[in-house]
Amino acid sequence: MSLPIRHLRPAAVLFDCDGVLADTEALHDRILAEEVSRLGWEITPEEGARRFRGLAWEAIAPQVEQRLGPGSVPADFLPNLIARVVRALERETEPVPGVLDALEAVRAAGIPVAVASNSSRPELATKLRRLGLAELFRERVFSVDEVERPKPFPDMYRAAAASCDADPHLCVVVEDSVAGARAGIAAGCRVLGYAASTPAAALAAAGAETFTRMQDLPTLLGLAPVAAA
């Protein structure tokens, strides 16, 4: 009798970035709320997180225009927003607690890894460089600029699995947003939902198996546990 796929060693592990590798969700929420508020929609970082977290930047302007009216979002809104975020990332990017040890356990087990993020290419490159992870992921890096459709569509995780020469149904996705969890499920992957900033119930409703300590990730993947720091 064969084991369920979730009990098998994954063919590849596909990571989201913000909130999974990089502890940058609060940074994004703060800057986005400030920039949207400047347009006339006064929102807090907390409200911005509820409305926009996990979405591609390109998905935000239409929602703002729906709220404020046509023409309310200037043409340079998105490039200026991304440029401001990249500048902040150069100063403030830190790893999610426990993720570097978890990544080392995955690497030591010889399991291919990829990163798939709704971030723009410049943002994602900055985060990986600041975290010292650019060499680990190498060419297996997928931003919103590399695919036709961003999360919650499955395109990004299908591309990430293909870069690892892996069947998506044998891959594990590590996510922290509802949009990302939906993308992983739609791609056919097993999804582990890191419930640090998104409620576990919301991730579970999207189809993810939830966990709250990044130190537990290797065990969830069937690898040796990471020793507590």
Image (cartoon, rainbow, N blue to C red):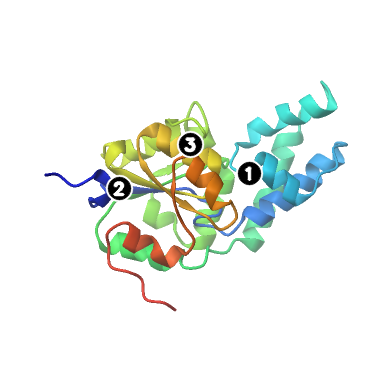
The foreground one among 183 and 130 is 183
The answer to whether residue 101 is visible is yes
Q: Earlier in the sequence, mark 3 or mark 1?
A: 1
- Marks 3 and 1 sit apart, C-alpha to C-alpha, by 13 Å
Q: Residue at 76% across / 33% down in the picture?
A: 76
Q: Which residue in the protein does label 1 denote? A: 53
Question: Label 2 amino acid?
Answer: Ala
Q: Which residue is mark 2?
A: 12
Is disc 2 placed on a helix, strand or loop? Answer: strand
Q: Earlier in the sequence, mark 2 or mark 1?
A: 2
Report whether residue 74 is seen.
no
Mark 1 residue element: loop
Q: Position of residue 18 (x, y in %)?
A: 55, 51
Label 1 Cα crowd, 10 Å radius (few <14 / some 14-19 / many 20+): many
Which quadrant is the N terminus positioned in? top left
Which image quarter is the C terminus in? bottom left
Furthest-top residue in this view: 70
Question: What secondary structure is marked by label 3?
Answer: helix
> How far across and down, in percent of the image, does residue 104 sit?
35, 65
Q: Considering only vertical position in the picture, is 52 above or below 111?
A: above
Q: Are marks 3 and 2 in contact (CB under 8 Å)?
A: no
| 176 relative to 184, above or below | below
- Residue wearing tag 3: 182
Q: Nearer the viewer, residue 211 or 145?
A: 211
- At horizontal 33% and vertical 39% (from top left) the residue drawn is 161
Along the horizontal axis of the image, is 2 left or right of 160?
A: left
- The amino acid sitting under disc 3 is Arg
- Between circles 3 and 2, the one closer to the viewer is 3
